[in-house]
Amino acid sequence: MHKSTSVPAISASPKEPSRAVAFIKAMLAVVWKDLVAEMRSRELLSAMLVFALLVILIFNFVLELDLPTRRVVTSGVLWVTFAFAGTLGLNRSMAIEKDRGCLDGLLLAPVDRSAIYFGKAISNLAFMLIVEAIVLPVYSLLYNMNLLNPGLIGVTVLGSIGYVAVGTLLASMAVQARTRDILLPILLFPVTIPVLLASVKASQGILQGLAITEIMPWINLLLAYDVIFIAVAFMTFDSVVEE
């Protein structure tokens, strides 16, 4: 009697980490490195925070305005502060990597280079959000306004994501130049005009209590900007750091 023989099951080798898991681990390792280095040195956050507080203090003494006018100019003052402090942080973040030789080590690591980009972008975003979380209450006290508004905080986060997404890519490009401190603002500010304009308009609309239908076009612009430039940075970061 013929016996049916079953094909023996092939023993599976221990599963290697998937590409996505390896990507996330590499990205989180870069973030953790930046956070630990900053906790030890405190040179990046302190510089950003002092600069931001000085800017709003100067505006506080210069702009002695009534409350309705303050609501009009507040969004512009806030985003000028965030943009300048963010640029300072982006410049210093990449300059520290370059001066200490860490950037070359990161590029030689056997990981997807886009993971390095996202790791640097997340750490830069974390630093920028920490500064903004301190600036908003201080500004509220100085100007006697309540800026701890969920809508305003949401716009601040969206605008910061777009600003950091482009800034991290351009800072990686500018860090190779001798004039990196001057080059980054020249490259960054023209490209970030849409995100800064949309952030100012959306913040102003929220502070003035406009209807959501009037604010949504600017928020949609912020969302589109974030998605497009994160995708662009993801696709071009490898070529930028190779050059």
Image: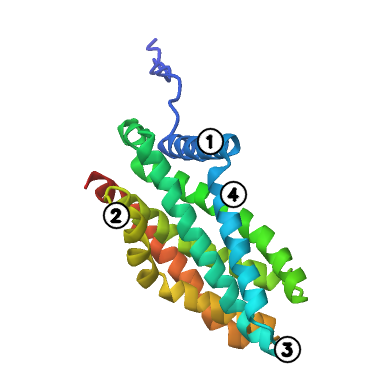
Residue 243 sits above or below residue 14 on the image: below
Of the numbered discs 1 and 4, the one sitting upstream in the chain is 1
Residue 68 sits above or below residue 34 on the image: below
Q: Secondary structure at mark 1?
A: helix
Q: Pointer 1: residues within 10 angstroms few (<14), some, or many (20+)?
A: few
Mark 2 highlights which residue? 179
Q: Amino acid at mark 4?
A: Ser
Mark 1 highlights which residue? 37
Q: Is residue 152 left or right of residue 216?
A: right
Mark 4 highlights which residue? 46
Q: Is residue 6 left or right of residue 155?
A: left
Measure how far apart labels 1 and 4 are at the Cα level: 13 Å
Residue 219 seen in the figure? no
Of the numbered discs 2 and 1, the one sitting upstream in the chain is 1
At 29% from the left and 54% from the top, the residue drawn is 179
Q: Are marks 3 and 4 in contact (CB under 8 Å)?
A: no
